Image (spheres, grey):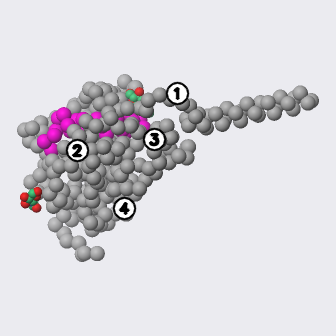
Amino acid sequence: MAYMKMRWVYISLVVLGVFCLFYNLEDLNPFKGEPVIFKNELGDFLQLPDIDCGQDPPFLVLLVASSHEQRFVRLVIRSTWGREKIIKGKRIKTFFLLGTSPSKDISREVAKESQKFRDIIQKDFTDVYFNLTLKTMMGMHWIYRFCPQTTFVMKTDSDMFVNIYYLTELLLKKNRTTRFFTGFLKLNEYPIRRRFNKWFVSKYEYPWDKYPPFCSGTGYVFSSDVAGEVYRVASSVPFIKLEDVFVGLCLKRLKIRLEELHSEQTFFPEGLPFTTCRYKKIVASHHIRPRDILKYWQALEGSLQEECPDN
Ligand SMILES: *[C@@H]1O[C@H](CO)[C@@H](O)[C@H](O)[C@H]1NC(C)=O
Ligand SMILES: *[C@@H]1O[C@H](CO)[C@@H](O)[C@H](O)[C@H]1NC(C)=O
């Protein structure tokens, strides 16, 4: 009997020990080696869009982080805010950023979609949420290599509503074309150290207590020179899987300061309830379902000539 009891105590201790070890391994282990570094020569493009930026430079290129299964959303975006447009004489183009899938069927579908629409940028990395940094850097690389002639770039997501009319208007007013970076500014953010949180970041991944200033990854806008600059310093900045923080680290290294696009809030990473008048004066809103993108876009385009009361 005593023996059985002892055995249970023993087993419990072992289980507890393993549990503690699991929890602290990351902080204890001195043999973790070098921090992960982004290798910017990694991977060639698998799919390229059909555009000659040298011949006919766009004013604004929108890069939309997307995933393979979001084919329908891409169709919706292509027919709404992502449709090629000339606004105030300025050309706006939208492209989608994709990684690769282990599934042959999905890969074939993407290749077909790319041939049909000619608006997909793809490199060889696994398309998973925590490879978003690679996806963003692919976008930077593409701008730097194939489209440095565009004046501005916006990186955004597929669950966003983007008012390209107002964005173009504000960018023209701002009259800044180099070392410019804007969006929803996050100036005082801290790493989340609670395990099991979606955005958990270990001390090993990011040893510092505070994040650099960065813009919410839901939508940020920059002058095209920034793409090349960020791409250039990316391999000398500690890698972090949170793409917006990573870009923030690059900007800090480059001493590029974040700026507000407008005195009023125009980027809404938490979303904003729709009214036509409200959405006429915003740049980006988050958590929008495809059918709402369609609805809001129709309402917005239908009211372009109408005035809204000021507040
Ligand atoms: C990101 O992609 C690389 C290259 O395909 C892959 O080795 C890695 O496992 C991916 N990252 C995650 C978090 O899955
Ligand atoms: C934009 O800025 C340049 C100089 O930085 C100035 O010459 C030009 O007049 C400005 N244009 C507008 C529309 O403010």
Query: Which residue occupies 20% across, 37% down?
Result: 144
- Mark 3 sits on what residue? 206
For residue 272, the mark is 4
Q: Residue furthest left?
A: 55
Whichever of labels 2 and 4 marks the residue nearer the N terminus, that label is 2
Are there few (<14), some (14-19), or many (20+) residues within 10 Å of tag 3?
some
Please tell me in which quadrant of the rendered image residue 58 appears: top left
Observer-side mark, 3 or 4, equals: 3
- Which amino acid type is marked by label 1? Phe
Q: Is residue 75 left or right of residue 23?
A: left
Q: Which residues are magenta?
A: 126-150
Which amino acid type corresponds to the residue marked 3 in the rendered image? Tyr
Q: Residues within 10 Å of mark 4 (few under 14, many from 20)?
A: some
Amino acid residing under circle 4: Leu
* N-terminal-most mark, 2 or 1: 1
Of the residues tagged 3 and 1, which is closer to the observer?
1
| Location of residue 159 with respect to 148 vertically, above or below | below
Q: Mark 1: give few (<14), some (14-19) or many (20+) Cα within 10 Å.
A: few
Q: Residue at 30% of width from left, 43% of height from top? A: 253
Q: Quadrant of the C terminus?
A: bottom left
Report which quarter residue 247 is drawn in.
top left
The Cα atoms of the two marked residues, 3 and 4, are separated by: 32 Å
The quarter in which the N terminus is drawn is: top right
Q: Which residue is mark 2?
A: 226
Is 139 positioned to the left or the right of 34 in the image?
A: left
Q: Earlier in the sequence, mark 3 or mark 4?
A: 3
